[in-house]
């Protein structure tokens, strides 16, 4: 017999490891993503009732898959006449029972390309991947994409229905179809990484392991498409950021900004791999968003060899990124880079010309810093206060409050 807490921990661990893998496997033949999610949810509920009594099975994922498949079969039989359900049920029954967790094929990449199908609305493709492959709820996805949870939930429901009704093939498409789908897949992988990266201490169960999952998916894409530069660029970008994870907190858990990090705490092997990937991508002569962002990180990585970042080059990279994407975040980072390059007035002027970032914490943090650099302490103080109010991470709030206190001392 297993205690309830142990069973719950085992179920949570299985969800973190394999939620998307199980959904993708269940939906691979039926094309019913919503049905697969519902069945898997019921399987987890059954696990929480069964495992404390009977013990956690030797193969939790295989147990969950078996129960979920039975739930899908029951659901079909309850709503469709036998003659109409026969073909659907046959698809489920054709899936061989895996003998252990390793026997469950990983269909996540196929599911990602299903979610990126051009028949689906562009604004739902990346969110659908985050929900179906990584288990995000509509509230978390809505927050990431600045959409109300209810509206995002409706979009996701419609998209899953479209996959089922249109009979969208559950497959990695031929190379000719890559251009119209690849951007959405890369965006979803990067969004997943960003969510995991934002939990610096790895204490949020919802974000735990997301960074590693995103890097795994990035590696898979790079292996699948060795002649495409942007997957290489994305993987390089994520590895550069992940390499610095140990240096983002000091011994007391305090936030350490990039410029103050100890490069000896960076993962040297990971940085080397990122640099190699970026070099490979550059040989294609087709710079894209992720290559440019990775190049910015590479410019910071020179500090591990005792050099200083080339801020003029970083300004140029952000200008190229802004021209390519039209992103206000690229414009924000360009303004900050201008100030670091020695022209604080130009950086502040560029920052003040931006619009639509009133609720974006990095904007206010950057504004406060640039105003302080320009000697405009009276204006910097309320900007710091605004940034503190918008920040969710307690360690970053403490860092900004210390900056605000020093501003008062001046």
Image (spheres, grey):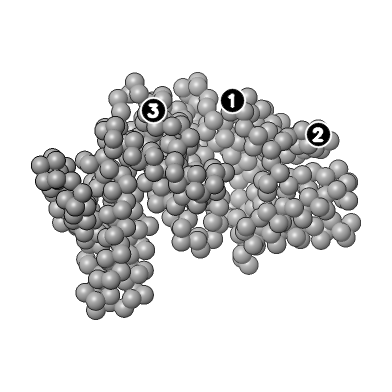
Q: Residue at x 45, y 46 (%)?
A: 153
Mark 1 or mark 2, earlier in chain: 1
Q: Which mark is residue 349?
A: 2
Q: Residue at x 54, y 30 (%)?
A: 289
What is the crowding at mark 2: few (fewer than 14 residues within 10 Å), some, or many (at least 20)?
A: few
Mark 1 and 2 residues: CB-CB less than 8 Å, in contact?
no
Residue 91 pos. (x, y %): 15, 42
Judged from the image, the secondary structure of the residue bearing numbered disc 1 is: helix
- Mark 1, mark 3: which one is toward the viewer? 3
Closer to us: 275 or 39: 39
* Residue highlighted by disc 1: 324
What is the crowding at mark 1: few (fewer than 14 residues within 10 Å), some, or many (at least 20)?
A: some
Q: Residue at x 62, y 28 (%)?
A: 326
Residue 225 pos. (x, y %): 36, 30
* Residue highlighted by disc 3: 118
Closer to us: 356 or 246: 356
Q: Is 281 above or below relative to 245?
A: above
Question: Mark 1 and mark 2: span between their CA atoms?
Answer: 22 Å
């Amino acid at each position: 017999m297993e205690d309830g807490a142990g069973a719950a921990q085992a179920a949570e661990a299985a969800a973190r490891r394999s939620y998307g893998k199980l959904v993708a496997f269940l939906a691979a033949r039926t094309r019913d993503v919503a049905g697969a999610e519902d069945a898997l949810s019921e399987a987890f509920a059954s696990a929480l009732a069964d495992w404390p009594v009977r013990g956690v099975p030797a193969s939790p994922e295989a147990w969950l898959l078996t129960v979920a498949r039975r739930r899908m079969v029951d659901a079909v039989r309850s709503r469709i006449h036998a003659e109409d359900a026969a073909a659907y049920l046959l698809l489920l029954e054709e899936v061989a029972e895996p003998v252990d967790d390793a026997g469950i094929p990983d269909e996540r990449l196929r599911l990602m390309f299903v979610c990126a199908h051009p028949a689906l609305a562009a604004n739902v493709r990346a969110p659908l991947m985050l929900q179906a492959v990584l288990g995000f709820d509509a509230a978390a996805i809505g927050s990431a994409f600045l959409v109300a949870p209810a509206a995002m939930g409706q979009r996701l429901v419609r998209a899953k229905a479209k996959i089922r009704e249109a009979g969208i093939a559950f497959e990695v498409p031929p190379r000719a179809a890559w251009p119209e789908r690849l951007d959405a897949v890369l965006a979803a992988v990067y969004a997943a990484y960003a969510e995991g990266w934002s939990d610096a201490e790895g204490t949020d169960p919802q974000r735990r392991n997301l960074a590693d999952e995103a890097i795994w998916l990035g590696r898979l894409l790079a292996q699948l498409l060795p002649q495409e530069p942007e997957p290489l660029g994305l993987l390089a970008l994520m590895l550069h950021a992940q390499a610095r994870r140990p240096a983002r907190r000091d011994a007391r858990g305090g936030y350490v900004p990039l410029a103050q990090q100890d490069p000896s705490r960076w993962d040297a092997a990971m940085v080397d791999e990122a640099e190699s990937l970026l070099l490979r991508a550059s040989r294609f002569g087709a710079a894209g968003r992720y290559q440019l962002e990775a190049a910015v990180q590479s410019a910071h990585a020179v500090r591990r060899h005792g050099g200083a970042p080339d801020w003029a080059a970083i300004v140029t990279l952000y200008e190229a990124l802004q021209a390519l994407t039209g992103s206000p975040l690229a414009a924000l980072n360009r303004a900050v880079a201008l100030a670091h390059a020695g022209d604080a007035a130009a950086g502040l002027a560029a920052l003040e010309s931006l619009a639509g970032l009133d609720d974006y914490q990095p904007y206010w943090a950057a504004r406060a810093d640039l105003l302080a650099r320009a000697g405009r302490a009276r204006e910097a103080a309320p900007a710091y206060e605004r940034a503190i109010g918008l920040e969710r991470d307690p360690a970053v709030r403490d860092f900004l409050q210390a900056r605000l206190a020093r501003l008062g001392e001046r």
